[in-house]
């Protein structure tokens, strides 16, 4: 029987700590952390994320602005908004919800956001900082995974860590954070040969490929820690991870559920980055 890592509870605990830290910071400096969230178009999943981000800001006591732009927004209009937010000293974090509609260039937006306000840590400057282990901002989802491991008392140093997935948002930065924590890290992807065999070596397995219930019990070592970053909709509308919980849970020592595992942590780490940015702004 695996211990279930309760991402909701850990997230609530960190948010309570952030709220306290924020109040102390506001008292000391008169500066309230501010986050601006931009969303373009009508993607329902994105709209849910944006709503949750606004709620999280309220919960920890931040100032927030949300820009819900129409689908036909031009690159020039989006750039102008980013420029304005870059110059606005009430705003310490700018997040442009991805994916953008196809006619807009995501890279152009990522490059345009001032790296000092890039609380997603997507700008190449911040990606480079992550690579050398001198963090300005932590990449939100991988940082959420690290916080779950730390707060569950799971040691990383010297462990075989297998990350499956190599996206810029999750897989690659996750590998870096585990490496900086002295894990022995393998990154697998769609061209990996003998994937099951590599996964079975893992003391810590991070599943981030976006395929519902892909990782089954036979792919997991007895006693492994299994972290499920997947968020997939089944045909019946139910949310499910990349891990087949029923067959993996009996073999794992720790496992994150979906929902209620990594998911709640991502926005909490975004809140942490926004406070870090506000603190940096008064240094
Ligand atoms: N879309 C899905 N996840 C994310 C995220 O963490 N940040 C942004 N900006 N867009 C996303």
Image: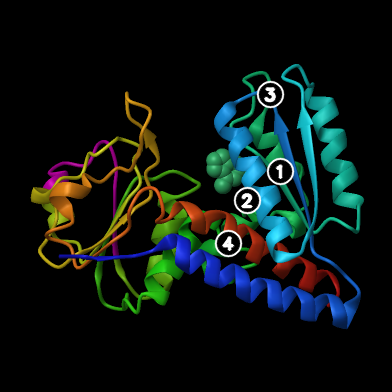
Residue matched to label 4: 269
Q: CA distance from mark 4 to mark 2?
A: 19 Å
Q: CA distance from mark 2 to mark 3?
A: 25 Å
What residue lies at 46% left-to-right and 66% top-to-bottom?
9
N-term-proximal mark, 1 vs 3 = 3
User: Are the residues tagged 2 and 1 within 8 Å (C-beta)?
Assistant: yes
N-term-proximal mark, 3 vs 4 = 3
Residue matched to label 1: 111
Neighbor class of circle 2 (other Cα within 10 Å; few <14, some 14-19, many 20+) is few
Q: Tell me the element at label 4.
A: helix
Q: Is residue 245 visible?
A: yes
Residue 62: quadrant of the picture: bottom right
Label number found at residue 124: 2
Q: Please state which of residues 229 and 22 is positioned toward the viewer in this rendering.
A: 22
Residue matched to label 3: 41
Q: Nearer the viewer, mark 1 or mark 3?
A: 3
N-term-proximal mark, 4 vs 2 = 2
């Amino acid at each position: 029987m695996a211990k279930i890592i309760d991402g909701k509870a850990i997230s609530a605990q960190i948010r309570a700590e952030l709220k306290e830290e924020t109040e102390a910071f506001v008292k000391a400096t008169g500066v309230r952390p501010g986050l601006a969230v931009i969303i373009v178009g009508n993607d329902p999943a994105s709209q849910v994320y944006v709503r949750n981000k606004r709620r999280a800001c309220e919960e920890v006591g931040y100032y927030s602005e949300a820009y819900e732009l129409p689908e036909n927004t031009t690159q020039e209009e989006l750039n102008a908004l980013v420029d304005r937010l870059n110059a606005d000293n009430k705003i310490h974090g700018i997040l442009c919800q991805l994916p953008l509609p196809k006619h807009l260039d995501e890279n152009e937006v990522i490059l345009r956001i001032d790296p000092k306000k890039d609380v997603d840590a997507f700008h190449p400057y911040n990606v480079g900082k992550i690579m050398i282990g001198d963090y300005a901002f932590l990449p939100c989802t991988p940082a959420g995974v690290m916080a779950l491991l730390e707060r569950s008392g799971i040691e990383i140093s010297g462990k075989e860590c297998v990350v499956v997935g190599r996206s810029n948002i999750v897989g690659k930065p996750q590998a870096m954070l585990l490496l900086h924590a002295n894990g022995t890290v393998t990154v697998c992807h769609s061209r990996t040969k003998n994937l099951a065999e590599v996964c079975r070596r893992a003391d810590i397995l991070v599943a981030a490929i976006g395929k519902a219930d892909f990782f089954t019990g036979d792919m997991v070592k007895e006693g492994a820690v299994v972290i499920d970053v997947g968020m997939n909709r089944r045909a019946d509308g139910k949310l499910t991870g990349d891990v087949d919980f029923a067959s993996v849970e009996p073999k794992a020592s720790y496992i994150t559920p979906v929902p209620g595992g990594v998911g709640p942590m991502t926005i909490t780490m975004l809140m942490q980055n926004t406070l870090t940015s506000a603190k940096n702004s008064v240094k």
